Each structure stands twice: as C-alpha cells, then as structure tokens.
Image (cartoon, coloured by chain):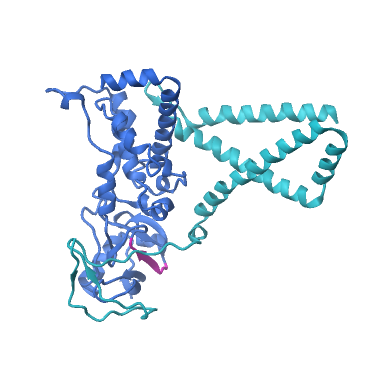
Amino acid sequence: MSAGQSSAPTLRSGTDQSHAQTPIYTEFHPRWYRPQISTYWWLGKWAYVKFILRELTSVAVAWTVALLLLQILEVSRGGEHYARFENLMSSPWMIVLNIVAFAFLLMHSITWFNLAPKAMAVRVRGKRVPALMISGPQYVAWIVVSAIVFIIIASRV
Amino acid sequence: MAKTITLEVTRYSPEHDLEPHFQSYEVPLKEEWVILDALNYIKDRIDGTLTFRWSCRMGICGSCGYTINNEPKLGCATFLTQYAPGPIRIEPLRNFPIVRDLVVEITEFLEKLKKVRPWLIHENGGGSGEYLQTPDQLEEFRQYSMCINCLLCYSACPISGLDPIFVGPAALALAHRYNKDSRDQGSAERMAVLSHPDGIWGCTFVGECTKVCPKHVDPAGAIQQYKLAGALDGLKQFLMPWGQKREAQKR
C-alpha cells in the first residue's frame, strides 16, 4: 500500500515538539494517534489493582506448594532435618511471609469460587441456576475440609 | 444566571497535533441533558470543529461510546447532573487509535468480528423453510445477542490494550451467542478459530467488560463458558481421539 504525503501543515504539540514529523496519510485513513499504555496502567483503577493482586496470588500458591513439598521431604529425612525445617519456619520473617501468602491464598480461593458460576451456565427447566447454587456448595465443601484438617491438627497437638 | 458545567474534551487534529490535548467548554447544566446533548450544544453553539460519533440518541446504535471521567460509557445514557458540579472529562474510547477528537478507528475490531463468524452456519447451507425454536432455546443465547457493538468492553479490557491481536470481549460474546443458538452448527468451526491463544485463552478474566456493558451482555461470562467448553473439548479429544475423528468425518 502506498502512503501518500499530505500538504504538511505545521504540527503543534502541547508538550513536545522534538518528535515533530510530517503526518503520513495511507490510502484508507488519516494519520492517527495510538496512545501508549503506561507500565503502571493497573494503578489507575481499583478494579485493575484487584485484578493484578489476583494474578499475583498464583505466586503465593506456588510458594505454598513448594513449601509443602519441602516439608514432606524433610519429614521423610527425619529428626534433625525436620527440626531444622521447623526452626526455619518459626523465624519471624517466615511467619510474616506465610501470613501474607495465606491472605493471598484466601483471595485466590474466593475469586475462584466466584468465577465458577460465570463459567457454568447450568439451566434447569429453562431457567439458569442462580450463582449461589454453584458457588455455595464449593464454599461449604471448603469449610468442611478446612474444619476436618483443623480438627486433625488440634487433636494431635 | 443558569447553572453551567465545564466539559474537558479531548481534541486531536491529525493535521495539526502530535498528540491529543484537552479543551474546556462551559455548557448549561440541564437536568434532562445527557453528555451527548452537551456535545451537540458545543458543536452547534460554541465550536463546530468538535468531532464525535453519534446516531440514535437512545442506546441502540452503539455509536456514542466515550471515556467519561475515566469510565467507558455511552454519551446518550450518561446524565450531566450525575457529575455536577464538574468538571467532566470526556475522552475517546481507550485501546483504539484516535482518528480525530473523540472519534476512534475501529477497523481492527471489525476484522476480529469477522474472524469469529458471527452468523448462523448450517450444514449444506441450510434448507428452505422456517427454523423452529422454543422460547427456552431462545433464552440460551438471547442475552448475548443484545450486543450493540458500542466497544465499551474493549475500552475497559486491559488485555485488549496490551495485546492488540486479542479477539476481545464483544466478538467472543457474539461467537458464544451463535454457538448457543439451536439453529447453528458452526461451533466446531468457531472453536478452531477461538481456541487460539489470542482467542478465549487471551482473556484473563478481569471482568470489567461485563461491568461496563450497557446491554448486560456479560462478555466475561460468555468467555469463561467458552473456555470451559474448549477445555472439555480438548479433554475429549485427548481421551477419545477416535470419537472426534468419526465426528469430523461425519462433518
């Protein structure tokens, strides 16, 4: 496609004259302006910040899985190894890190459960099943499993 | 003296400007006026060079989408009074190149729309006569057929801005609309196009497209449903490759 040249009027810019150039016209449309997206675009709106935080929860999930695998490894290696692991886990910075990771895990789970009704458009007798009917059982299952784990841990301590 | 409100409107002239800038206009603050009325007042009484798209004035044509105080909205459905005492900042829709003032270039979207084949696809081109459909079958896709292509969803979707080849909310919702239509047989054809990384998998479910949709189409929901269908389709192909081959042969 050949790009024709305009009669090149003087360009004015609010802030920057250094990039002044002749506007280029293509066959179908005039020269246009494509705004650049800032690296910090997600700070412009709370919904976008929440989205980025939600995406970051995957790091917390990966961290927790790695920690769990390490814990299993140390348990299998026994006594002294596990004592060292426990010592590491009880350090203040590790506790803070895990509290933050736990908060992110909660966010991860809640946003996931809330997504489920969006993805599952179940229809019964021509009517779409309400969102709560799909996310509700997941929350119940989550609470029940958490309670069982808590009871097991509490009974051992 | 009658009350007024200030509108800060994006101005961009491709012949004269390197980048857009704002121009302020004082317009009457009338209770019954929407943003579009104010823009037309400016065009008629203050500055005839102001350029913007509009047509029906009643939320049907989808032409008057602007970014109003950082939110994508229809100019004809947004009242001045909700922003009083102002000022109100009116910019073009985000994530599209600006042609002039509030007018954006939408060819990219039209290409994407075509790609998802938003029409009824029927084996052998369909027969003659009527296609019967029950009210329940209509309900399956009715919500997704309400799209007016106003592009507010593209403006709200950060992925559309960051990844310009992402098919985007409205086009994906429309693909879903035809997949859900009992008269359509083109879902496999569309799946081949949309199960691409720039199709449904490009969506990271920010969810803003659904929030800004003036017609309650819920593109985010449509895409997540499509993802689920795509994942199940992939799983089926993996578990039962012979079944898929037979289906393909049938087609």
Magenta-colored stretch includes residue B90: yes
Q: Residue at x 55, y 40 (%)?
A: A111
Q: Residue at x 27, y 56 (%)?
A: B64
Residue at the outermost left position: B128
Q: Which residue corresponds to the image point at 27% horizontal and 59% vertical from the top-left? A: B105
**Relative depth, front residue between B92 and B127:** B127
Q: Is B24 one of the magenta-colored residues? A: no
Magenta segment boundaries in residue numbering: B85-92
Q: Position of residue B171 (x, y in %)?
A: 31, 43
Q: Could you say where residue A107 lies in the image, as x and y percent from the top left?
A: 61, 43
Q: Which quadrant would the N terminus of chain B be assigned to in this image? A: bottom left
- The chain whose colour is cyan is A
Q: What is the x, y in percent for residue B92?
A: 33, 62
In the figure, B122 relative to B198: above or below? above
Is A27 on the left-hand or right-hand side of A80? Answer: left
Apparent colour of chain B: blue
Q: Horizontal and vertical percent for residue B103?
A: 27, 62
